Amino acid sequence: MSHDHASHTASAKTAALNAQVLKDLPFEDTRDFDFAARGFIATREDPEIRSAEGRVIFNLAAYNFLSEDCPPTVNPSLWRQARLLTRHGLFKVIDGVYQVRGFCVSTVTFIDTRDGYVVVDPLTTVEAAAAALALVKRHVGDKPVCAVIYSHSHADHYGGVRGVTSEADVLAGKVQIVAPEGFLEHAISENIIAGTAMNRRGRFQFGYTLAPGPVGEITSGLGPRLSTGSVSLMAPTILITRTGQELTFGGVRFVFQLTPGTEAPAEMNFYLPQWRSVFMAENANATMHNIQPLRGALVRDAKAWADYLTESIRLFAHDSDSMFAAHGLPRWETGQILTFLKKHRDAYKFMHDQTVRMMNNGLTHQEIADTLTLPDSLSTEWYNRGYYGTYQHNAKAIYTRYMGWYDGNPANLNPLAPEETAKRSVAAMGGAGAVIARAQAAMAEADYRWASQLLNWVVFSEPANTQARAMLAAAYRQMAFQAESGQWRNVYLTGAQELEHGVAKAGGGASVSLDTIRATPTRLLLDFLSVRINPDRAADKRLTIALHLEDFGEHFALTVENAVLVHESDVSGFEAQLTLRLKRADFLAALLLGVDLAPKVTAGDVAAHGDLQIFKDFVSLIDPLNGNFNVVEP
């Protein structure tokens, strides 16, 4: 096999494996396609959703190729899932409940009440949300928005809020914003400390730099691509603090169920008793979800997830004729809803319980991942397939939640770093040529998993070895073409892309918004600064700054010593080399944008007591962010 054009085609082994999928899974079951089409009203005439500047932030036509037959370069199960997830437009779930699907990775719901629309989870970006609202107003009715519900604390469920309402209407009390307890803190904090690393890895998980197509991105398995417009955030005006709490908008009752620690740290479902309809947020999907995302995040609690689904069944399912969610497809009929929720619950519970059982029998996370399989009664349900989360990775996450990263083997207690391991492994095997020869033999046998490990050692020991890079990219592509998981496909294809073309210097997806920065508590921003202190530059420094943010009424004692930044909110008795009194915006401008405070001191906008050089020294200790660090090479 040559490793240029040929690596973009399916090998005979890959084609055979994908053909076998068609025989192994119940493709004759087409109920999901009926669900996906049911209630369709209309979609946009112009497939391109644009920003105010004219930039395309989402193209509804990007997945038109999915209307063709599945090619050998895509797992047929993933192709099927992508066809379902990219069906776009406005749909009626039941009278009064409408969804716009396919405009972003998530789904936005519009509940038609006497007083106007209650908007549930307004997508990732302002532009996508505004396009969805315009579609609803055109085809359902030109009514105002009276409330917004955030089901949980992930940006694809709140980022478009300014596309459906305004700050003026919220401040005037015309629109309420409802969210689960802890929403704002988790929406801001979950990604801020490790945000740079998460965003870099997110490029791999979501395939931001890949073009959709038969040899490219085929969704993430959870939904189509993220829209890439403006991300906004408005604080909740009503918090849901307990299960059973009720709210009424325009005569429609909402009964809430808190589910913290499931798919998000702050999350909730709700039930509409008058309409016998249940909303399951992101706790029940058309795919197995992540217990720990590939981009990184705190490990979620698979047991709690299953237990809350049990509670949902008890509270709502027996009295539900329809079910809708924040991703994927609605479902109808009480029996089908019960079967779905029970089997989806059992998949999480089985995965948790059997991982722990094998862990207690001495198996390591890798051994469990290679062993764990669902019973046929669960694995043959399409919604339990690993399109987004996978059982292999979820088993590792469950193991890590209980046991941490160490597998108990003394050889793995203090191993060599990857680059050093690669160099010594290549040398021990007779040099790069010998390792490449072994990899070529593995490729010939279609043993791509082993070939990629061998070639990864060569790349990490000799990054400029073009033969190894090309072969590794080819191995990654074959594993991508075989992958049922949209995430795995994106990871492998992005790895191949970076091996061949280097790291793209601009990431895809939504960036941190001004709304998010404004909403971030100062203590969290100071925590973010703490993890960016460069120890070499700070080693011999001792700096003390008393910081008074006058417009926020906040006071902080900042100390840099022993290459550690410590901040405290009590400044009484604090001996500061420099005391600053200023507005929070001026402080952030000086930190984040490099604005010189000296002119503001001269103008009287900032009060400084002490040597202003102390603050300049402090800023100089903060490492710049690098969102383009290497992943597939040292």
Image (tube, rainbow, N blue to C red):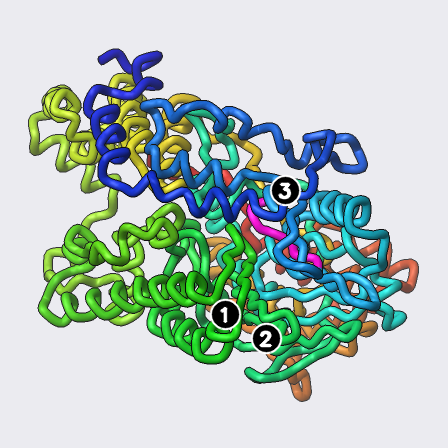
Q: Is residue 628 above or below residue 623?
A: above
Residue 105 vs residue 294, the one in the foreground: 105
Q: Is residue 484 left or right of residue 526?
A: left
Residue range of the region highlighted in magenta in the rendering: 104-110
Give the x, y percent position of residue 94: 64, 58
The residue labelled by disc 1 is 265
Q: Which mark is residue 103?
A: 3
Instruction: Tell me if residue 299 can be seen.
Output: yes
Residue 109 lies within the magenta run? yes
Identity of the residue drawn at 77% across and 54% down: 164
Q: Earlier in the sequence, mark 1 or mark 2?
A: 2
Q: Is residue 363 above or below residue 30?
A: below
The residue labelled by disc 2 is 182
In which quadrant is the N terminus drawn? Answer: top left
Q: Which residue type does callout 1 highlight?
A: Pro
Q: Quadrant of residue 157?
A: bottom right
> What whole-number distance in Å separates the C-alpha atoms at marks 1 and 2?
8 Å
Q: Which residue type does callout 3 highlight?
A: Phe
> What whole-number distance in Å separates the C-alpha atoms at marks 3 and 2?
28 Å
Q: Is residue 32 left or right of residue 233?
A: left
